[in-house]
Image: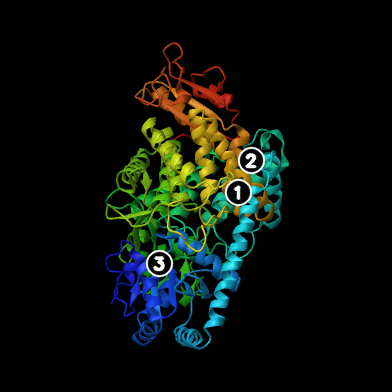
Amino acid sequence: MNRLKESTSPYLLQHADNPVDWWPWCDEAFERARARDVPVLLSVGYSACHWCHVMAHESFEDQATAALMNAHLVAIKVDREERPDVDAVYMAATQAMTGQGGWPMTVFMTADRQPFYCGTYFPRDYFQRLILGVSNAWRSNRASVTGQSARIAAILTEQMKQMNGWAEQAPSEDLAAVCDQSVTALAATYDSRRGGFGGAPKFPPSMVLEFLLRHSERPGGPAGGSALAGRALEMAATTATAMARGGMYDQLGGGFARYSVDADWVVPHFEKMLYDNALLARVYAHLWRRTGDPLARRVAHETCAWMIRELRTSQGGFASALDADSDGEEGRFYTWTPGELTAELGGPDGEYAAGVFGVSRAGTFEHGRSVLQRRAEPGDAERFGAVRGALAAAREGRARPGRDDKVVAAWNGLAIAALSECAIVLGAADLLAAAEAAARLIASVHLRDGRLARTSRDGESGPSSGVLEDYACVATGYLALSGATGQARWAGLAGDLLEVALTRFGDGNGGFYDTADDSERLMYRPAEPADGPTPSGQFALADALTSYAALTGSPRHREAAAGALSVLAPIATRYPRAAGSGLAVAEAMIAGPVEIAVVGARRDTRTAALHRTALLAAPPGTVVALGEGDCDGDGQDGCLALLAGRRLVDGAPAAYVCREFACRAPVTDTGALRTELAYPGPQPDPR
């Protein structure tokens, strides 16, 4: 019997027809294991995971392996994206036992949910022997098995104490010093030739790049001769350029793959995740507004367009990911041979395409196939555009990678923020419409009685409660959308979500757990303050709290943001690459953050120009409020506290630049606003 058929998780549904007697994560599964007196096998993965598919094909679809699993174990399948709390707890156990982690994650545990043997991918023959070995140890040497589980539980408990110890340290009073030291530490691991930090594999350092860009715009930056700020901008720009020129970026359709398996950004691990692309779209938009680099502008727009084209669901939300595989082969959709280029384009254009995209007979990937790169801008833009369009159209005839159409609240929050900001900065109204549609879906489907559901699918909310990153990232998305549209409703919803985060997730010491106080109790209550592939829940919350405080003038939210950053110094000191999002928030705090109130009629082109200039010229981390004019700041009728008392100037739209609600004299033209913001970089073409 397979109990996954009613799941809302595409990953679990991939296993619904396995001969394995799968259970979802539930109390009944553990009760069944206790009644049968057998161990539990926990298998954790996600739908876009290549090696998850490999293990599924080799073992979970194999009758002989399934028979062993059914006879000797109770097997539980978990989607890590649906249950990040379960994934976090048992990934910590896996790393404690093996020194490494990854997916698929394979954990043998007792019916009391304590792990005693952990690993990741196991080949079928080894996995079969492992099942028999575990079963034999369970029957003949139970004391050793349970002793091992007790030791692992003790190790995890001690790790949690150490994390809580970080939170209990006195927060650094000098955020600027913490950020400066982090830039220096990052420079020590920076790959000056290839971009990025460290060696292969290279993951997109999205949050670190955002921090470096913000650092480069701190007062006294490159325009003022600060070598450290200049170094920060150099590292960010070089890394962003290298990623966009290599094979990790889809040179035909846009969008970034999960990571590069090599140090040169040539061969990606081909799955594409919503969160990577949402984070990177903002980075490239900020790089463009900082430097005027046309490559950064193009990549920002193409990445947003890719999210809308490839991941938007019929309900208006954004799906989680695209698979790495198609036709049972990794990367088949994205790679080419010289012969395929010639077959699609003809001889001359085929040779031309091979040259500009770096396609060779030897290939850069498996089986003589090449991942497309674009190491330089081609001289003949018209010819290149025609060739690129023809290849993109031809590629549509290939078997497409599978799509995980599960909507994750946190990642949609990141997408809403990116699309809202890029819409105004890049002058693309379609991006703002997409952001609004996703925001409405989260509000109507995920938000139930004031609480967030982690996921939805086909317009129906999933079974899992939202974790801290869901509340924080959706709040951030709503605040960005409010700043882009001038609709106070979204800021109000953000405030509601932040209230839940403050009352349900706090640890009593200024820090935050990843799960609510009424969530399911696991081996321990997870609290990971460091960044992973996405901003940590705690740092993401600090970001949302900082912006909300700047819009509303709330000292409570400002103090809570400072408390959430209490772990920044100890993490950044040890692992600056795991503190990028927290460091970015710190730079916003150092800057004030800058607050800009733009008042004027919505349909007045002068209002729109001031609004766009505010987002173009102000440093990242700035909050922008848009309203019609004088109001009482009660949050009603589009009026936030930052707009209270802000009036038109001689009947003309005006912008007020403020810090902690202390504002300079209003300005009415875009040039004066740029001067007021001391914008240090070139003035990009606003088209």
Q: Determine whether label 3 and label 2 are within 8 Å by CB.
A: no
Identity of the residue drawn at 39% across and 30% down: 486
Q: Report the mark closest to the observer, 3 or 2.
A: 3
Image coordinates of residue 476 in percent, x first then y, are 46, 41
If the image is split into quadrants, where does the C terminus sit?
Answer: top left
Residue 216: image tag: 2
Residue 32: image tag: none
Q: Which residue is mark 1?
A: 236
The disc labelled 2 sits on which kind of residue?
A: Ser
Q: Determine whether label 2 and label 1 are within 8 Å by CB.
A: yes
Within 10 Å of disc 2 (Cα), the crowding (few <14, some 14-19, many 20+) is many
Distance from Cα at disc 3 to Cα at disc 2: 42 Å
* 618 sits left or right of 638 in the view: right
The disc labelled 1 sits on which kind of residue?
A: Ala
Residue 684 in view in this figure:
no
Could you tell me which secondary element the residue under label 1 belongs to?
A: helix
Within 10 Å of disc 3 (Cα), the crowding (few <14, some 14-19, many 20+) is many
Identity of the residue drawn at 59% across and 49% down: 580
**Nearer to the camera, 371 or 452:** 452
Image coordinates of residue 191 in percent, x first then y, are 66, 58
Q: Residue furthest top?
A: 650
